[in-house]
Amino acid sequence: MIYDSLFIKRPGLTVGSLFFLTILMVSTCHADKEGHPEAFKVTPGMENLLDANCYACHDEWEQEGKIRLDQLETLSLSARLDLLNKMQEKIRFKEMPPRKEKEQPTDAERTALLKWLSGELKKHNASKLEDKLRMPDYGNYVDHDKLFSGKNKHLKPFTPDRRWLISEFIFDAKFNRLLNSKPILKIDGTRQHVLGKRSSFTNPFLLPGNTGVRYYANETLNGGHLLTMLSNAKESARRMTTGLARRDRNYIPALAAIMDAENRHYATLASRKSFLNSYADQVLRDIYADKNDVLLPKFVRVKIEEKKTVDANGKPLKKAEFHAAAPGKEEIRIIYRDLKKHQKDGDTDEQLIEKCEHDWFSFGVNERRIKTRVVFMNGYMAGMKREMNTGHYKNVRLAPYKKLNDTEMQAITSAVLKHRKKGDTYGAIISKCMAEWEQGFIQERIKAGPPKAEIVGALVEQLFNKILERSPTSEEAEKHVTLTQSYIKSLGREKAIEKLIQTLILNTEFVYRSEFGQGQADAHGRRMMSPRDASYALAYALTDSSPDSELAKAVAEGRLATRADYEREVRRMLAKRAQYYVIDESVNNQNDIANFTNMPIREFRFFREFFGYPKMLAIFKDNKRFGANYDRTKQRLVTEADRLVEHIVENDKDVFKELLATDKFYIYHSGDNEGMKVSSDRIRKIYDYFKDKGWEDFTLEDLIKHKDFIGEIKMRGIDVSRLKSSGAYNPLRAFQNQMKSFTLRLGKGQTAAAPYNSFPAHGMANADTRYGGRLQSPEVAKFYGIDMYNWNYQSVQPAKIDHRMGILTHPAWLIAHAQNTETDPIHRGKWIREKLLAGTIPDVPITVEAVVPEDPHKTLRQRLNAKTKAKYCWTCHQKMNPLGLPFEMYDDFGRFRTAERLEYPENLIKKSESKGGLEQDLRDIYKTLPVKSAGVLQGTGDKKLDGEVKDALDLISRLAKSDRVRQSIIRYAFRYFMGRNEFLTDSKTLMDADQAYLKSGGSFDAVIVSLLTSDSFIYRKVSNTSNN
Amino acid sequence: MNNRRDFLKTSALTAGAFALPSSLSALTAGSAAGTPPIRFVFIRKSNGIRPNELALPTFSDAEKALDAKRQPMEVDLDKHELPEWLRPLNKHKANLSILQGLSCKMSENGHWSYSSVMGAYKSGRNSLSGIKRATIDFELAKLSPSPFEHVELSLTGNYSTFRTGIVSGYSAPAPHQRNYCYADPQTAYNELFKSVINPSAVDSDNAMLAFLQGEENFKAGKLLGYEKLKLSNHISSIEAIRARNKKLEKMSDAIAKHLPKIDPVHADGGLNASTPEKQKAMTDILVAALVTGLTNVVTYTIDELSTPIKGLQGNEGDHISIHELGHSGGYSGISADTIREKIRVGHMEQVATIVERLKATPEGSGKGSMFDSTVVMYFPENGEGHHSHGTEAPFITLAGDYCKLDMSGRYIRLPYHGTEGHKTIGNWYTTLLNAYGNPIKHYGDFDLEMSRKKLAQVGAIKQLMA
């Protein structure tokens, strides 16, 4: 693998081989003949280079950045290694000497310096550069022009053999698969099995929160993973054995077979217990006839204290609501069951309660529980009777007594006769019988001996397939059978199986994806991935799940061995739309936010992560400064950004350009154009129908006259079946509130009304989500500066919005790249430099206090300039600020603006109300200054595009036309699908993907096909040093 | 934290926490020879604490007025009587402090705060992605290593029944991670003291780890370079856990000596146990976990809104919903306010027991006790009421003689939310971290009203630093 690390232009040597050669050369000379470490010495040649290039700013007279390089020999080892690492990095990334001020060393000089530094660090195994170059932040340090010039297209791409730690998403999918968790969502009226729901386990494989590509094959398993996985393994093993396997014999057949006797015994015990718990009285009366009552303990009622109903002042005390006083679901079920049993006797409430209490006493129910039941019945009998035959409890009743089969009845009778003593409650008798039966069954199992080796072998085979998704090798099978047998010996069968499950879940194979070459190497030492590894690599490239059945079949039938095979499968998976995925569970809410897609989830997720707009969810913002309820609205904003991305990627034409420059957006929309139009039109119909009918002065009688219309069109909060002139039901207020709101939405000649609810209430909504829930949070329109009562709502979306152009002007992106209380031109600029222009920004020097000073009389732009225009800062900030400042045309909530509010207490002009209607802007009023949104674009490599820009829209329109921007996005796509940074050897892969995009008219599917059938993806090479 | 430089400083200090190998090394670490470890107990309660419930009944008129108007003030507790419900702490007044005036608006407000009140962030209800950082208890646990690092206990439910077993907790070991916690006394007992009460289970754990280590060693033997590293780190982790288990084995005598007795009513999740019985058993376990040295940090959710209250004295027959109490619903003729107070009294009895047991356990030289280096904090998970706005987040703390904070024996009211000098839970947690060795400049998110008003809000509460 080749990093573009050394800038050598000697013919006949690849830069990568030189890099390794360099390291090898210096690594051999770090001890003298006696083995003593050599004293550190700056060689005369290096001294000259340092003198010529570095000492001017870093010697005894000058210590820029508090760095001094002329006394390296006197430093302690750790301080010197630290400094040498910094030097290596600065020289490697050409950050030093400063470009504009200093004459630059030649490539040869730079190489020599690097060789020396690398050698010194290698002596102590202390170089940090290789680790850094693997990190996502350093991907752009590979020269863009060299990648796309064609000069390196002859290099042979490959990816090293590797293990790749599973992602947080694969973790969830794995556990959901293992535990047969198949969540269902009703989407567009149809029940759909969805993927992407979080598992209930603690997820130790969380991806970093950065924008861009988050999932790289760099991570290694560590102690944190193991600690969490120990608990996860234990819990999942418990659920698999005591839950799933008991319910479904086919879940793991060998487990069921080994547990057969136990499970039969459990079932018998459960059946007897349930039977006796329900019919003990009947059974014991059958056995003991009249003597039964004599044998029971004497009934003593629980003592209930008299309760007050008024407080010390004689005022009635507020009593807990029925549902809040009920003693738990199971308890209330028992109460209803027994009430119904005795109700037929025609007793008074008091008699009824006493009869129930008697039953419970005879049964031996804990006294505290009896008391709780009785207290509840005493206090809420009227409510209980009201609900007795409705809702959840309608069907609660004891089924008529039916004996078990003769053998069972015989076993029960004999145990009862053996154990019953005078004074025993039914519960006590049952416990004694159960203990005897349980002990008997245990003895029976001990007598039967341990399970045979064959069945344990089958268990190992089936658990390997269930957990690791493959059969064990014969050696593995043998080892695991022996291990399981030792577990059985010490723990018993069920616990032993749990332990085996834990062992397999804790195998590193469960959490590492395996991508290794197999078979004959080509002339360049590359081998194709094994078909099995390839099937997982392809499945995980596009989804979070293991290979689907067709991919698995292709492996089994030997049809995943050529590039054409890969292409066939990639195209098939890209076209698949039968599977729905929840995109983001922290956004998704069945009640009001539908956040799903049926695109291959990782294709969609690339853009979500590349743009990084979901990061806005973590930005904590002030409702007051938003002027409405920001917290309630932010999820809707993210899901509407998701919808826009999905819409563009699904169209698959000019995808990058569309994402960057579309002028169409979703605002308060479910994604169902037809449904939204019906909802909006309905409001129009209601408004038109009533607008001239004097609805403001309607009485109930007037409303009743329009019952037919209301019944047909349906109005929120009005139940026409209850509309009667004589009745107490009066929904006039609901009606008038709606009409007031509809008038505000349509009364000024607006073309259509946004179908949001006029007031909060359960029941029907004015518009539905695609899950059938209530579409809420219309305040999302406020991010676009829309006046809610002067809104020409567009039902068909995405629709054109003024002052917006693409995702970078979507409020979600703007907030994600803003601070809590102000915008963030630096990070917006940094994002564009790195993500769209394939540029690099050095780390902020440790000595920099990166805080923009406060000043109540200046705009942020002015304050930022005052801080960053200093020579020391501007070297880096010139790469960011001019790209970020054009976005000052939006505030930190993403609202378009022409003036910046100077939000300092001394600039406060007027305080606004804290609460108000949707139409109100609840922001405090501050003094303002005009916004300047000019900036400069440099770095596209295209003279027609580079230059001054007047605002963000001008900037974006140029970016959208840039070849470099297109290629930069392709570089990120490469990293996303390969899980690593690109190297010069990947030049051909990148150029092919770029061409695939251009030739297909801007299809992202074409890019994916190109990448996943490239040599970089298909070919693997043995990794044998820590440097690659 | 405020800027990148601070971030680097603090992340260097806590880097291990994210990678978590440090957690593993912490498992086998002990405190410096002769120095007792520092201990923290966080007790979360639901339904808020209304600030006037903490006002001292013997306030002078002037003090009463200041307190009612939420003006800053400070009085010595030894010159005053405690409110009725705090009386179980009378004996410990010298260790007690009542801290009023903190706010928690940057955490979730309303009915529930989930993990956010201990992390000073908005968690987006209880979403995983909302967990922004390790909660304060985990940050403190890093400063005081122990075999279990951190133990979380809870008595929660679904209004109908108590949760049982090992369930999701409210603490967060790292961003986007939810802790596991023990939800009933029997489970906590079985898991924490397993090395003594169920050694065969520990043996089988060790056998499994040994097998895994052998397998991974075999695989790693065939690899080189970076790929080898991917397995060797894992092998080291297995070794560390085995070392932890060995250490626990060695501690088994000490554990056995302090093993709590759990009443049979708690078997199988304790279906018939009353809430006070569950609380008492949890207290026994909490104290034993500290005394045996298994952990130095415990977080205990003594109740949340959906915890059923059963068997409360005077309401023995009622199945009480704490949520309903928040909406003024009374039970058996007893008003919601009275029951709320009775619940708090029950809590205080448990807090007093924890303090007394630790005081009765000698530690260090001379007359020292385990309580000397312990800080117990009792606080509402959601601020000042049933439906809180987060403007007030009172804390009741009890701290021993080695406490590094200067607040014991005092009632302290800090300036009110949104005014000059106001402090948030972020400032409070920063104070704890700074005092006990983490120099972080600020822990937690900032308060947006303070930001909007450009009021200073960074760092520790200086007046509380010893």
Image (spheres, coloured by chain):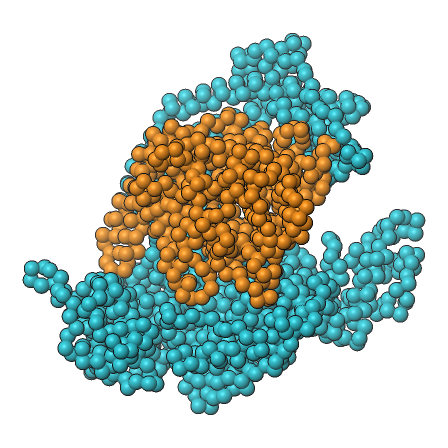
Chain colours: A cyan, B orange
Q: Where residue A907 sits in the image (x, y, percent)?
A: 63, 74
Tell me if residue A1024 comes above or below residue B197 in the rendering: below
Q: Within the image, what quadrant is residue A953 found in?
A: bottom right
Left/right placement of residue A98 relative to residue A41 reads: right
Q: Which residue sits at x=42%, y=83%?
A: A939
Q: Which residue sits at x=24%, y=56%?
A: B223
Q: Where residue A79 sits in the image (x, y, percent)?
A: 25, 64
> Front-most of A658 and A540?
A658
> Front-most of A755 and A843?
A843
Q: Within the image, what quadrant is residue A637 found in?
A: bottom right
Q: Can residue A991 be seen here?
A: yes
Q: Which residue sits at x=65%, y=58%?
A: A592
Left/right placement of residue B378 relative to residue A777 reads: left
Tell me if residue A172 comes above or below residue A992 in the rendering: above
Q: Can residue B132 be seen here?
A: no
Q: Which residue sits at x=46%, y=61%?
A: B1
Q: Where residue B458 sits in the image (x, y, percent)?
A: 50, 61
Tell me if residue A959 comes above or below residue A497 in the rendering: below
Left/right placement of residue B178 relative to residue B124 reads: left
Q: How many marks?
A: 0
